[in-house]
Amino acid sequence: MFSFGEKIKIQIFGQSHSDSIGVVIDGLPAGEKIDMDALSAFLKRRAPGRNEHSTMRKEPDIPDFISGLVDGKTCGAPVCAVIQNKDTRSGDYTFLADIPRPGHSDYPAFVKYGGHNDIRGGGQFSARLTAALCIAGGIFAQLLEKKGIYAGAHIQEIHGIKDESFNPVSVSKDILKTVTAKDFPVIDDEKGKLMRREILSAQEIRDSVGGIIELAVVGLPVGVGSHMFGGIENRIAAAMFAVPAVKGIEFGAGFSAANLYGSENNDSYYFDGGIKTKTNNSGGVLGGMTTGMPLLMRVAFKPTPSIAAKQESVSLSEKKNAVLEIVGRHDPCVVPRAVPCAESAALIALGDMIL
């Protein structure tokens, strides 16, 4: 199993084409009611086959809870939920056991496991496992909302086409709920149309595109997190890189802070029914601890490596160059379906520190 967490342990298991995938969550407080309709809605945002710009693999992604709940409430035992894999086409991947896909885990996994790695759909390295991650994320979202903490994200950029950004000092739970309720989660719907068109254009030329997700968390108390390895950024980043295709994360002003003077980057304090800052270049984190301002981050996703265009690779058995032409069902852009995955990664990191 793949594990995360200190106070609340999250373990994810399965492969893309195994009979099932699932998650075990150990350490949740007892007596918490889980709204299954809300959880189903959260999972549906990630589910494949919902529109023309996602893979046509159709999975219902209905979790079966086999332990940890009694009458819909946590009982103190580990919560275990399983999702059945129903729409697999393993034959599409047979030839990849010999010819690794550029941009994928195929080659290092082949070496690490002596050629015994599960190549079907990417095996345990597949984004399919983010369905299990989102079960945990959806549960943590409900528990944190009871404490007045809300997380939400939108597509900020796809292949150079940019959406509006969250207001770093005044983003609210209402704004987060509005944007995450959309089928294509952007603030400016006109920019969303351009993004969809860009995704389809890439698909038409047998290619793919990547993008950036902007994520905010509001309602956090001051002082969550710690210094050194226990910092908010550390913990969230560790969870975020569990989402396949993530290549970078920045908080607040991020890399652009390197071009500012200290006087420009520092967030001035003021009183307004409490202590706030006029700007939020810190992204709501100082010294690894929350400041009480919105927690803001941006996550970069690479283009989907499985593309229909011919690519150069090698034959592992013949030890010579080869040309690879991938078949199967793949997202021309992972970003739209990755929005709830990014939220889930942030939620499980925060939930482990707060709940």
Image (cartoon, helix red, strand yellow):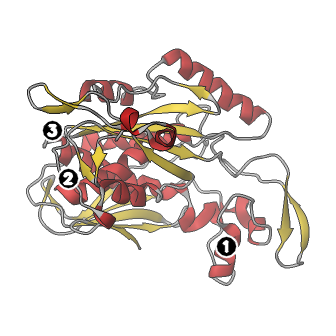
Q: Nearer the viewer, residue 85 or 187?
A: 187
Residue at x-position 12% and y-position 25%: 272
Q: Where 276 sits versus 312, above or below?
A: above
Marking on residue 63: none
**CA distance for labels 3 and 2:** 14 Å
Residue at far top of view: 190
Residue at x-position 46% and y-position 25%: 186
**CA distance for labels 1 and 3:** 43 Å
Q: Nearer the viewer, residue 181 or 52?
A: 181
Within-10-Å neighbours for mark 2: few <14, some 14–19, many 20+: some
**CA distance for labels 1 and 2:** 37 Å
Residue at x-position 24% and y-position 47%: 290
Q: Where 140 sits versus 213, above or below?
A: below
| Residue 107 spot, x, y in % from top left | 71, 71
Q: Which residue is label 2 attached to?
A: 224
Q: Say whether disc 3 or disc 2 marks the residue closer to the N-terminus.
A: 3
Amino acid type for the residue under numbered disc 2: Val
Does the CB distance between marks 3 and 2 fall below 8 Å?
A: no
Q: Say whether disc 1 or disc 3 marks the residue closer to the N-terminus.
A: 1
What is the tally of numbered marks visible in this picture? 3
Nearer mark to the viewer, of 1 and 2: 2
Q: Quadrant of residue 8?
A: bottom left
Q: Quadrant of the N terminus?
A: bottom left
Residue at x-position 44% and y-position 59%: 84
Q: Nearer the viewer, residue 213 or 178?
A: 213
Q: Where 251 sits versus 152, above or below?
A: below
Q: Which residue is label 3 attached to?
A: 148
Amino acid type for the residue under numbered disc 3: Gly
Q: Which residue is label 1 attached to?
A: 108
Q: Quadrant of residue 11?
A: bottom left
Does the CB distance between marks 1 and 2 fall below 8 Å?
A: no
